[in-house]
Image: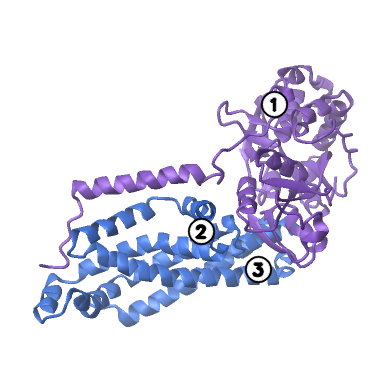
Chain colours: A blue, B purple
């Protein structure tokens, strides 16, 4: 236990970075997910194709490969982002693909009549989406979105491989001094579990408040 | 006119997706694992060009007598099994790196493991388990591996968990910079600078005292850290001297400045309860240091990038914790 208590400030900094990364990427991935899901149901074939290509590419490539590619390949063509920004962009883009599919599933639960009625009273595609389809669609998939957010939290640990000192990297650094892998990584694991439980609780709360009982 | 009508099974979109994936995968293949466009395995032109030690070194290496291997000992169990089970690396140039063509593992650590296997079994049969630097103590305590050969720095903290035979090699941390950099001449110039380090290497703990106020960025592998230095993500790269020397040889864009500023003693990690095995391994180290095998292995591997001949092997038990 000493191995944990003696390095609380390192763990604290790592935890804060993990939380920051999770919050920033969750917001980014949600926005991307909504845009891509919209593309996938758009009436224009080209937009649908772009949405499909986005999802298939980012869902089917390993996150670590994307991270390494983004961090080390882009500077060769003269584009260099700070490491935290790089990790945030890549994780948001990657998780955005998963969220898009969850959101699309939600949209598909909204009855066709709803969309037809929205168009019949003169709403444009964008208006019907914003005021009729998405509010109902998102409420149907709160739980799957929560699950993806938990997966996103776990995936932030991969940022350690490209130099971001988040919780996993902080645990690595502490273990380097203490050589107590079981205690150190159990501590880090418990911190991840705590964060995941919080996300789960928030998801449950939102679900009870917002879900539409049909 | 429903906006919910979906049709995505067309052959066209499938072909489009396949093309996009192929392009992305090709791009990953180029820059994914090492980040460098032309991976170069360091080698020694004078030693046959590949940095591999000659078969004759294995043939001449000593084998333990039956008297050295008592019944019921770890050594006997290894001899019966027919191979030595070690923990090591597959991606450390000159120390333990798997040759992508032949599949054999080359380097100082890998060769030392083979020689220990030869000493116990009579033939250099080694099964290498790649283990992260985080889990070495746990693997040894659980006896998942017989020994760890992985530039395992001997520290008093680690010695409370496991036993170290040796030290069998000493090295030190040095500073690598971009070739056009003239401001940094030694570790003293790193104060307040951004320094790239290898994750889970001794540099992480050594830098705060050697260069106060320096900011660290850690990368998982040596090629990544080198690439980050060349792409100006940091002002310098602090790493083991031999690794930096081999990196500088493969990458004309970087150079090593100053002398090593720490002394790291590397030991062979063993289970802590098994004092008999530790004594046995130390006796083996004594033998190969005395008969010149150690120097031949050093020249064939690390010697290919370091000026001058083989150094004097470190004295057994000389490090705090061995």
Residue B121 position (above or below residue B135)? above
Badge 1 sits on which subunit?
B
Point out the tag, 3 or 2, that comes first from the N-terminus: 3
Indicate the position of residue A110 as horizontal and vertical percent values: 19, 71
Residue A166 position (above or below residue B58)? below
Badge 2 sits on which subunit?
A
Disc assigned to residue B163: none
In the picture of the structure, the residue carrying the numbered disc 2 is A79
Pick the front one: A53 or A151? A53
Badge 3 sits on which subunit?
A
In the picture of the structure, the residue carrying the numbered disc 1 is B52
Q: Quadrant of residue A210?
A: bottom left
Task: Please report the residue visible at 40 percent of the width from the left and 67 percent of the height from the top.
Answer: A29
Which image quadrant: the C terminus of chain A?
bottom left
Disc assigned to residue A11: 3
Instruction: Give the crowd class for mark 1: few <14, some 14-19, many >=20 residues within 10 Å.
Output: many
Q: Secondary structure at mark 2?
A: loop
Q: Are marks 3 and 1 in contact (CB under 8 Å)?
A: no
Q: Secondary structure at mark 3?
A: helix
Q: CA distance from mark 2 to mark 1?
A: 39 Å
Pick the front one: B94 or B120? B94
The answer to whether residue A82 shows anywhere in this view is: yes
Q: Secondary structure at mark 1?
A: loop
Image-based side of B259 in relation to A170, left or right: right
């Amino acid at each position: 236990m000493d191995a944990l208590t003696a390095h609380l400030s390192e763990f604290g900094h790592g935890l804060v970075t993990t939380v920051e990364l999770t919050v920033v990427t969750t917001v980014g991935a949600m926005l991307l997910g909504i845009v891509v899901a919209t593309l996938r149901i758009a009436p224009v074939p080209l937009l649908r194709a772009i949405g499909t290509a986005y999802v298939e590419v980012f869902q089917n490539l390993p996150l670590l490969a994307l991270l390494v590619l983004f961090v080390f390949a882009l500077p060769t063509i003269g584009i260099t982002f700070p490491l935290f920004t790089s990790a945030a962009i890549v994780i948001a883009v990657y998780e955005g693909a998963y969220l898009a599919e969850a959101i699309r599933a939600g949209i598909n639960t909204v009855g066709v009549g709803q969309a037809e009625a929205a168009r019949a009273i003169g709403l444009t595609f964008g208006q019907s989406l914003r005021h009729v389809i998405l509010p109902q669609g998102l409420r149907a998939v709160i739980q799957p979105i929560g699950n993806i957010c938990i997966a996103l939290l776990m995936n932030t640990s991969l940022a350690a491989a490209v130099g971001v000192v988040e919780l996993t990297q902080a645990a690595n650094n502490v273990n380097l001094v203490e050589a107590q892998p079981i205690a150190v990584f159990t501590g880090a694991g418990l911190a991840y579990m705590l964060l995941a439980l919080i996300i789960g609780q928030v998801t449950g709360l939102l679900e009870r408040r917002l879900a539409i009982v049909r | 006119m429903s906006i919910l009508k979906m049709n995505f099974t067309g052959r066209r979109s499938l072909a489009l997706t396949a093309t996009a994936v192929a392009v992305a995968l090709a791009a990953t293949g180029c820059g994914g694992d090492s980040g460098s466009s032309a991976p170069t395995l360091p080698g020694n032109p004078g030693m046959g060009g590949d940095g591999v030690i000659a078969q004759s070194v294995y043939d001449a290496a000593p084998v333990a007598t039956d008297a050295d291997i008592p019944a019921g000992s770890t050594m006997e169990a290894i001899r019966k099994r027919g191979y030595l089970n070690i923990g090591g690396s597959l991606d450390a140039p000159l120390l333990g790196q798997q040759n992508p063509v032949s599949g054999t593992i080359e380097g100082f650590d890998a060769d030392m493991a083979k020689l220990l296997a030869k000493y116990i079994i009579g033939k250099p049969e080694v099964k290498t388990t790649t283990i992260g630097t985080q889990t070495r103590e746990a693997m040894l305590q659980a006896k998942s591996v017989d020994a760890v050969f992985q530039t395992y720095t001997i520290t008093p903290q680690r010695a409370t968990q496991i036993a170290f035979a040796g030290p069998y090699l000493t090295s030190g941390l040095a500073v690598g910079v971009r070739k056009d950099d003239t401001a940094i001449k030694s570790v003293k110039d790193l104060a307040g600078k951004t320094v790239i380090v290898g994750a889970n290497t001794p540099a992480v703990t050594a830098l705060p005292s050697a260069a106060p106020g320096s900011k660290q960025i850690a990368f998982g592998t040596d090629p990544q850290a080198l690439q980050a230095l060349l792409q100006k993500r940091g002002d310098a790269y602090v790493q083991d001297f031999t690794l930096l020397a081999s990196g500088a040889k493969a990458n004309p864009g970087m150079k090593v400045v100053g002398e090593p500023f720490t002394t790291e003693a590397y030991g062979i990690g063993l289970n802590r309860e098994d004092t008999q095995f530790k004594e046995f391994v130390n006796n083996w180290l004594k033998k190969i240091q005395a008969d010149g095998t150690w120097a031949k292995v050093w020249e064939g591997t690390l010697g290919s990038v370091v000026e001058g001949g083989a150094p004097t092997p470190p004295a057994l038990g000389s490090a705090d914790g061995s």
